[in-house]
Amino acid sequence: MKTVSEDQLQAFILKAREKKNRPQATAV
């Protein structure tokens, strides 16, 4: 298994946060 870089992890967290903040935009 590859380790996820911090940059990728932060980007993933940001995307998850955006989904939580804007549930209507999940279908984009």
Image (cartoon, rainbow, N blue to C red):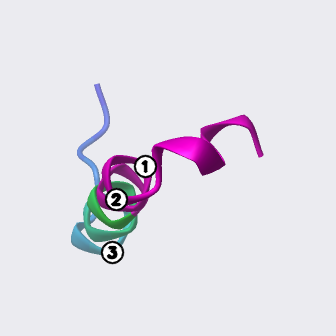
Q: Quadrant of residue 11?
A: bottom left
Q: Nearer the viewer, mark 1 or mark 3?
A: 1
Q: Residue at x 29, y 58 (%)?
A: 17
> What's the distance in space between the residues labelled 1 and 3, CA to CA?
19 Å
1 vs 20, nearest the viewer: 20
Residue ID for mark 2: 21
Q: Is residue 24 a member of the stretch shown in magenta?
A: yes
Tell me the amino acid under the disc marked 1.
Lys
Query: Which residue is identified by label 1?
Result: 19
Q: Residues within 10 Å of mark 2 (few under 14, many from 20)?
A: few
Viewer-closest of 20 and 16: 20
The kind of residue on which mark 3 rests is Asp
Q: Indicate whether residue 23 is drawn in magenta.
A: yes
Which residue was labeled with disc 3? 7
Instruction: Look at 72% across and 36% down and name the residue there.
Output: 27
Over which residues does the magenta segment extend? 15-28
First in sequence: mark 1 or mark 3? Answer: 3
